[in-house]
Amino acid sequence: MLSKSSAGAPVTKRENRFVAGGCLVILAVLILVLGVPVSWFWYAAWRNHRTTEDHEAKAVASLLQQADYMADHSGRALRASGTTRPDVLTGLIWKHTEAPVIRHDATRGGFTAVVEKAVDYDMVSFYGVRPGRAVRCLVFTYAHGPGDTWTPEVTVSEADACRKSNEIQSTAREARIHLSRMPSEALTVGGIQQGLDPAGRPDLLTVQSVTRERSTLSVSATISSWDGTANQCYRLTRPISGGKAESSTIAAPAASC
């Protein structure tokens, strides 16, 4: 006769094998059930990231292509002008690049323009598509050669190189808005200084002169960066009177004040 303990041993072993086998099946099912979503999540994240990178790369390439276009057309405008007058050439560069800071090298006769340009692109994520923006600091240089020849070139600089030009541009925009909204009786040197600089910061904007030519008012002002280490002369013009002053007022860099 078999003993009680020896008779139950095969049964216990079979139960253990059954439990072990069941655990393996459950583990395999869990790995399959959880692994598929995790793998999909990882792949989707990778795909969204690659798609976003592709969109950004195409947007930046388009921005740089446009920068080359601006350099080429502004260079042609300088050559076609037939003049060496810095004020006229500065205006042509600003017209084609909208650079808030344009430096004239009186020794060599060349120009350097600094401007920040941005382009939008689509950023793809699990939550859908949201707008992204690529920003580049562009430096345009114009070398003056023999006769009326000009050699334009555009390079991408560090973002900090555009910080001061952005600050000057911001102050110039505010000044243009303030000047356009001033009543005609306030258009004196003192009134314009106060109107363009309501915060009382002459270190940021200083009116140099005010001239009237028929129905047009012209203001020359020096606009500085917030730390005072960079400045640019600006010429602001507006109709002396009339209802179109706000839409007709212009603030543009000038070669000198």
Image (cartoon, helix red, strand yellow):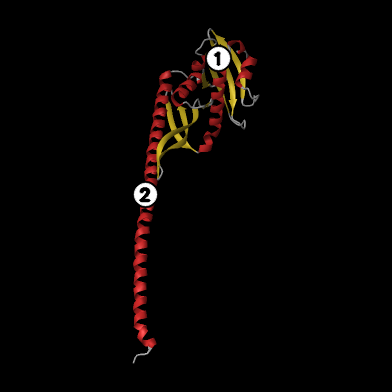
Which residue is depicted at the point 37% across and 44% down?
51
Residue 255 lies, in percent from the top left, at 53, 22
Q: Position of residue 249 (x, y in %)?
A: 51, 17
The 10 Å Cα crowd at callout 1, few under 14, some 14 to 19, many 20 or more, is: some
Nearer to the camera, 106 or 196: 196
Answer with mark 1 or mark 2, whichever residue precedes in sequence: 2
Quadrant location of residue 11?
bottom left
Count how many numbered circles sit on residues in the image. 2
- Is residue 192 toward the left or the right of residue 89 in the image? right
Quarter of the image with the N terminus in it: bottom left
Q: In this figure, which residue is indicated by the disc labeled 1?
A: 218
Task: Say which residue appears at 56% left-offset and 17% top-offset.
Answer: 181
Label placed on residue 133? none
Q: Which mark is residue 44?
A: 2
Q: Nearer the viewer, mark 1 or mark 2?
A: 2
Crowd around label 2: few <14 · some 14–19 · many ≥20 (10 Å): some
Q: Residue at x 58, y 11 (%)?
A: 184
**Quarter of the image containing the C terminus?**
top right
Residue 221 at x, y = what percent? 59, 20
Q: Secondary structure at mark 1?
A: strand
Q: Is residue 217 above or below residue 225?
A: above
Q: Secondary structure at mark 2?
A: helix
Residue 112: x and y in percent read 50, 29
- Residue 147 in sight here: no
Q: CA distance from mark 1 to mark 2?
A: 58 Å
Q: Is residue 48 visible?
A: yes
Q: Which quadrant of the view contains residue 30? A: bottom left
